[in-house]
Protein backbone atom coordinates (compact mmCIF):
# COMPACT_ATOMS: atom_id res chain seq x y z
CA UNK A 1 0.00 0.00 0.00
CA UNK A 2 1.15 3.54 -0.74
CA UNK A 3 2.48 5.39 2.32
CA UNK A 4 1.62 9.09 2.28
CA UNK A 5 3.80 11.45 4.32
CA UNK A 6 1.67 14.59 4.51
CA UNK A 7 0.63 17.33 2.12
CA UNK A 8 3.61 18.16 -0.06
CA UNK A 9 1.96 21.46 -0.90
CA UNK A 10 -1.46 22.98 -1.08
CA UNK A 11 -1.64 25.47 -3.97
CA UNK A 12 -3.81 28.56 -3.53
CA UNK A 13 -4.18 31.74 -5.62
CA UNK A 14 -3.55 35.41 -4.84
CA UNK A 15 -3.81 38.68 -6.71
CA UNK A 16 -1.27 40.36 -4.41
CA UNK A 17 1.85 38.35 -3.59
CA UNK A 18 3.32 41.10 -1.40
CA UNK A 19 0.22 41.07 0.82
CA UNK A 20 0.35 37.27 0.82
CA UNK A 21 4.02 37.20 1.85
CA UNK A 22 3.38 39.75 4.60
CA UNK A 23 0.58 37.58 6.02
CA UNK A 24 2.02 34.06 5.80
CA UNK A 25 5.72 34.87 6.36
CA UNK A 26 5.75 37.99 8.49
CA UNK A 27 2.57 37.62 10.55
CA UNK A 28 2.25 33.83 10.89
CA UNK A 29 5.97 33.02 10.70
CA UNK A 30 5.97 30.52 7.83
CA UNK A 31 9.31 30.73 6.01
CA UNK A 32 9.22 31.68 2.32
CA UNK A 33 11.38 28.83 0.98
CA UNK A 34 10.98 29.08 -2.80
CA UNK A 35 9.81 31.56 -5.37
CA UNK A 36 9.41 31.31 -9.11
CA UNK A 37 8.36 34.16 -11.31
CA UNK A 38 8.26 36.09 -14.54
CA UNK A 39 6.03 38.95 -15.72
CA UNK A 40 2.39 38.00 -15.15
CA UNK A 41 3.15 34.93 -13.03
CA UNK A 42 4.58 34.06 -9.63
CA UNK A 43 4.59 30.77 -7.68
CA UNK A 44 5.85 31.01 -4.08
CA UNK A 45 6.15 28.31 -1.40
CA UNK A 46 5.87 28.73 2.39
CA UNK A 47 7.06 26.12 4.90
CA UNK A 48 4.28 24.89 7.20
CA UNK A 49 6.39 22.11 8.75
CA UNK A 50 9.36 19.94 7.84
CA UNK A 51 7.17 17.96 5.44
CA UNK A 52 4.40 20.35 4.37
CA UNK A 53 4.30 23.46 2.19
CA UNK A 54 1.70 26.06 1.27
CA UNK A 55 2.02 27.53 -2.23
CA UNK A 56 0.48 30.54 -3.92
CA UNK A 57 0.15 31.44 -7.58
CA UNK A 58 -0.11 35.14 -8.36
CA UNK A 59 -1.89 35.98 -11.61
CA UNK A 60 -3.06 39.39 -12.87
CA UNK A 61 -6.76 40.09 -12.35
CA UNK A 62 -7.28 37.65 -9.45
CA UNK A 63 -9.82 39.00 -6.96
CA UNK A 64 -10.65 37.80 -3.44
CA UNK A 65 -13.66 35.53 -3.14
CA UNK A 66 -16.61 36.48 -0.97
CA UNK A 67 -16.06 35.37 2.62
CA UNK A 68 -17.84 32.14 3.50
CA UNK A 69 -18.01 31.01 7.12
CA UNK A 70 -16.10 27.86 7.92
CA UNK A 71 -18.17 24.68 7.71
CA UNK A 72 -21.48 26.34 6.80
CA UNK A 73 -23.37 24.64 3.97
CA UNK A 74 -23.45 26.27 0.58
CA UNK A 75 -24.95 25.45 -2.82
CA UNK A 76 -23.65 25.75 -6.35
CA UNK A 77 -20.10 25.22 -7.55
CA UNK A 78 -17.68 24.79 -4.65
CA UNK A 79 -14.31 23.10 -4.21
CA UNK A 80 -12.96 24.22 -0.88
CA UNK A 81 -14.30 25.05 2.58
CA UNK A 82 -11.29 25.83 4.78
CA UNK A 83 -7.82 24.66 5.73
CA UNK A 84 -6.73 23.84 9.26
CA UNK A 85 -3.09 24.19 10.29
CA UNK A 86 -1.95 22.09 13.22
CA UNK A 87 0.01 23.72 16.03
CA UNK A 88 2.14 22.05 18.69
CA UNK A 89 0.58 23.51 21.82
CA UNK A 90 -2.41 25.29 23.27
CA UNK A 91 -0.08 28.23 23.92
CA UNK A 92 0.68 28.39 20.16
CA UNK A 93 -3.06 28.61 19.51
CA UNK A 94 -3.43 31.65 21.76
CA UNK A 95 -0.26 33.29 20.39
CA UNK A 96 -1.77 33.05 16.89
CA UNK A 97 -5.10 34.40 18.16
CA UNK A 98 -3.34 37.39 19.69
CA UNK A 99 -1.18 38.04 16.59
CA UNK A 100 -4.15 37.92 14.23
CA UNK A 101 -6.21 40.16 16.48
CA UNK A 102 -3.37 42.68 16.93
CA UNK A 103 -2.94 42.81 13.13
CA UNK A 104 -6.62 43.71 12.69
CA UNK A 105 -7.89 40.34 11.45
CA UNK A 106 -11.14 38.89 12.76
CA UNK A 107 -10.40 35.78 14.81
CA UNK A 108 -12.79 33.54 16.72
CA UNK A 109 -12.59 32.47 20.30
CA UNK A 110 -11.04 29.02 20.91
CA UNK A 111 -13.55 26.25 20.16
CA UNK A 112 -13.48 22.79 21.78
CA UNK A 113 -14.27 20.15 19.14
CA UNK A 114 -13.55 17.24 21.50
CA UNK A 115 -10.47 15.95 19.68
CA UNK A 116 -9.03 19.39 18.77
CA UNK A 117 -9.20 22.97 20.03
CA UNK A 118 -9.41 25.50 17.20
CA UNK A 119 -9.50 29.16 16.30
CA UNK A 120 -10.85 30.49 13.00
CA UNK A 121 -9.96 33.48 10.84
CA UNK A 122 -9.63 34.63 7.23
CA UNK A 123 -6.37 35.15 5.34
CA UNK A 124 -5.98 37.69 2.54
CA UNK A 125 -8.19 36.81 -0.46
CA UNK A 126 -10.86 35.77 2.10
CA UNK A 127 -9.32 32.30 2.47
CA UNK A 128 -10.99 30.66 5.49
CA UNK A 129 -8.32 29.31 7.83
CA UNK A 130 -8.34 27.38 11.09
CA UNK A 131 -5.56 26.62 13.55
CA UNK A 132 -5.94 23.47 15.62
CA UNK A 133 -4.22 21.84 18.57
CA UNK A 134 -4.80 18.12 19.16
CA UNK A 135 -6.35 17.23 22.51
CA UNK A 136 -3.67 15.10 24.15
CA UNK A 137 -5.92 12.32 25.43
CA UNK A 138 -7.83 11.85 22.16
CA UNK A 139 -6.29 10.51 18.93
CA UNK A 140 -8.82 9.84 16.19
CA UNK A 141 -6.03 8.53 13.96
CA UNK A 142 -5.36 5.67 16.39
CA UNK A 143 -8.99 5.24 17.43
CA UNK A 144 -11.27 6.14 14.48
CA UNK A 145 -14.91 6.89 15.34
CA UNK A 146 -18.06 7.45 13.28
CA UNK A 147 -20.96 9.08 15.10
CA UNK A 148 -22.96 10.14 12.03
CA UNK A 149 -26.65 9.54 12.82
CA UNK A 150 -27.32 8.61 9.18
CA UNK A 151 -24.08 7.25 7.70
CA UNK A 152 -23.99 6.15 4.09
CA UNK A 153 -23.65 2.47 3.21
CA UNK A 154 -20.06 2.99 2.06
CA UNK A 155 -18.95 4.73 5.27
CA UNK A 156 -20.45 1.90 7.37
CA UNK A 157 -17.76 -0.37 5.88
CA UNK A 158 -15.24 1.13 8.30
CA UNK A 159 -12.10 3.28 8.30
CA UNK A 160 -9.70 1.00 6.44
CA UNK A 161 -9.31 1.12 2.63
CA UNK A 162 -11.46 -1.52 0.90
CA UNK A 163 -10.00 -3.27 -2.14
CA UNK A 164 -12.06 -4.35 -5.12
CA UNK A 165 -13.93 -1.13 -5.87
CA UNK A 166 -11.52 0.14 -8.51
CA UNK A 167 -9.98 -1.75 -11.40
CA UNK A 168 -6.62 -3.33 -10.57
CA UNK A 169 -3.48 -2.15 -12.34
CA UNK A 170 -3.07 -4.60 -15.19
CA UNK A 171 0.07 -3.10 -16.74
CA UNK A 172 2.32 -1.27 -14.25
CA UNK A 173 4.88 1.10 -15.75
CA UNK A 174 8.14 -0.88 -16.07
CA UNK A 175 11.19 0.78 -14.45
CA UNK A 176 12.89 1.25 -17.84
CA UNK A 177 9.87 3.28 -19.08
CA UNK A 178 9.61 5.59 -16.07
CA UNK A 179 10.52 9.07 -17.24
CA UNK A 180 10.48 12.41 -15.48
CA UNK A 181 10.08 15.38 -17.81
CA UNK A 182 11.45 18.88 -17.18
CA UNK A 183 9.00 21.40 -15.78
CA UNK A 184 8.62 24.70 -13.98
CA UNK A 185 10.79 25.00 -10.87
CA UNK A 186 14.02 23.45 -12.04
CA UNK A 187 15.58 26.92 -11.93
CA UNK A 188 15.33 26.74 -8.11
CA UNK A 189 18.29 24.36 -8.03
CA UNK A 190 20.57 26.60 -10.12
CA UNK A 191 22.71 28.44 -7.57
CA UNK A 192 23.61 31.34 -9.87
CA UNK A 193 19.97 32.49 -10.17
CA UNK A 194 19.31 32.85 -6.44
CA UNK A 195 18.24 36.43 -5.56
CA UNK A 196 18.76 35.92 -1.82
Image (tube, rainbow, N blue to C red):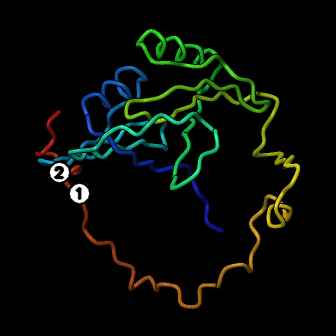
> Which mark, by number, is residue 82?
none
Left or right, 167 with reference to 40: right
Residue 20 spot, x, y in % from top left:
32, 31
Q: Nearer the viewer, residue 196 or 36?
A: 36
Instruction: State the SS at label 2.
Output: loop
Residue 63: x %, y % from top left: 31, 40
- Residue found 34% across the figure and 42% down from its top: 45
User: How many numbered dots are placed on residues in this image?
Assistant: 2
Assign the C terminus to one quadrant of the image: top left
Percent position (x, y) of residue 192?
11, 45
Give the structural element (helix, strand or loop) at label 1. helix
Q: For residue 31, what is the image quadrant?
A: top left
Task: Classify mark 2: residues with Cα within 10 Å, few (<14), some (14-19) or many (20+).
Answer: few
At a point 52% along the width and 52% down the height, the residue shown is 78
The residue carrying mark 1 is 186
In the rendered image of this protein, does residue 6 appear above or below residue 131?
below
Name the outermost residue toward the bottom: 170
Q: Residue at x 77, y 71 (%)?
A: 162
Quadrant in the picture for residue 91? top right
Left or right? Give the position of 107 relative to 89.
left
Question: Where in the figure is residue 103, as x and y percent of width and height?
Answer: 41, 13
Q: Would residue 83 be found to the left or right of residue 44 on screen?
A: right
| Residue beneath disc 2 | 190
Residue at image point 25% right, 55% down:
185
Say which quadrant the N terminus sits in.
bottom right
- Asked if the residue under mark 2 is in contact with the one under mark 1, i.e. CB atoms within 8 Å, the reply is yes
Extreme front residue here?
75
Q: Is residue 183 left or right of residue 125?
A: left
Label 1 Cα neighbours within 10 Å, binned few <14 / some 14-19 / many ≥20: few
Tell me the distance, in whole angstroms, between the alpha carbons under discs 1 and 2.
8 Å
- Foreground mark, 1 or 2, reads 1
Choose between 67 and 88: the one closer to the eye.
67
Amino acid sequence: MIKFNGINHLAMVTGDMDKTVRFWRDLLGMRLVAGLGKPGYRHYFFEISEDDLLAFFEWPGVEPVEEKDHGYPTAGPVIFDHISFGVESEDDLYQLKDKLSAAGFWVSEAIDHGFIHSIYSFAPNSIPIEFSHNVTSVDIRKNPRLVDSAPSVVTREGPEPRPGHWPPVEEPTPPQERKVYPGEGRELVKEEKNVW
